[in-house]
Image: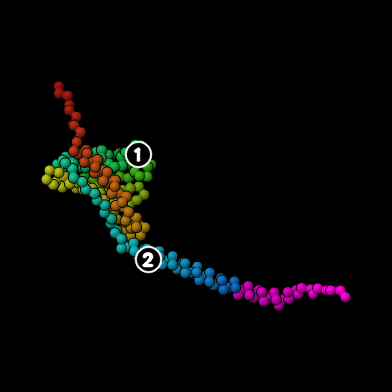
Amino acid sequence: LCNSRPKPRQPTLAGYDALVRIGTRVWRTWGRMAMKWVRRIVVGVVAILLLAVIVSFFLPRNPVVTRSIEIDAPPETVFVFVSDLRQFNEWSPWFNRDPDATYTFTGPAEGVGQTMRWESDNPEVGSGTMTIDRIEPDSEVEMSLAFAGQGPATAWVTLEPSGAVTEVTWGFTTDLGFNPVGRYFGMMFDGLIGPDYERGLEQLKALAENPPEPANEDEG
C-alpha cells in the first residue's frame, strides 16, 4: 500500500470574503479611532490658540520700561546732554555696537522738532528716527520714535533734583494695539530694553559728572 498525504485545502472564495470583511471592519474601526484623535487634536489646538488670543487682551497694551540713576550734578548740567540729539551718541548704549551706522540731523539745531535719523545693518541697532516733541527746561525731554518696520513709540528723560544730586529717569512706551503676538512680545520689553537703558544712564552719569572742558578761543 502506498502512503498518500492529504493535499492542503485551498482557500475558498467564501474564505477570502470572510478575510476581506474582517480586514474592512478592522480598518474602519481603526480609521474611526484615528479620525476621533485627529479631531480632538485639531479642536485642542484651536482651543489653545483661542485661549491665547483671549488672554492677550488682558496683557498691557502700552508696556512701560523705566530706569533711573542718581547723578552728582545739577539738573542744568545733565539737561545739556539729554536735550540735544547731537549729543545723544555721547551716552547712547547703542552707538558703539555699529561703528558703520550713519546718523543725520534735521530740523532746528536744538529744541522741539530736532530730529535724528540713524541707519544700520546691525539688527541690534536697526534704523529709525527720533524727534524731540516737548521740552521742559532743566526738567524733562519727550521724544517720539519711529523704528523701521515697526510702530511708533515714545521715550522721555526726566530730571528731578534731590539734594546735591539729580535723579534721572529714562522711560519708554509704545501702543501695541490689538495685536496678540505684539502684546506677548511686549511682556519681554523690560528685559530687552531695560539693560540698555541702565548702560546708557551709567554713561550719561560719567559724562555729566565729568563734562568735557569747553574749547577756549585764542584771545587776540
Q: Quadrant of the C terminus?
A: top left
- The circle drawn on residue 81 is none
Decide: is 187 above or below 12. above
Classify 10 Å Cα crowding around label 1: few (below 14), some (14-19), many (20 and above). some
Within the magenta stretch, is there residue 23? yes
Within the magenta stretch, is there residue 136? no
Classify 10 Å Cα crowding around label 2: few (below 14), some (14-19), many (20 and above). few
Q: Residue shown at 24%/44% (left/top)?
A: 201
* Amino acid on which the number 2 mark rests in the picture: Leu
| Residue picked out by circle 1 | 98
Q: Residue shown at 36%/49% (left/top)?
A: 149
Q: Position of residue 119 (x, y in %)?
A: 34, 41
Q: Residue shown at 26%/52% (left/top)?
A: 65
Which corner quadrant of the image does residue 61 belong to? bottom left
* Left or right placement of residue 161 versus residue 66 in this view: left
Q: Quadrant of the N terminus?
A: bottom right
| Residue picked out by circle 2 | 51
Evaluate whether residue 138 shows in this view: no
In primary-sequence order, the first of circles 1 and 2 is 2
* Left or right placement of residue 190 versus residue 166 in this view: right
* Amino acid on which the number 1 mark rests in the picture: Asp
Q: Nearer the viewer, residue 1 or 163?
A: 1
Evaluate whether residue 98 shows in this view: yes
Residue range in magenta is 1-25
Q: Position of residue 107 (x, y in %)?
A: 25, 41
Q: Position of residue 108 (x, y in %)?
A: 23, 40
- Tell whether label 2 touches label 1 (CB within 8 Å): no
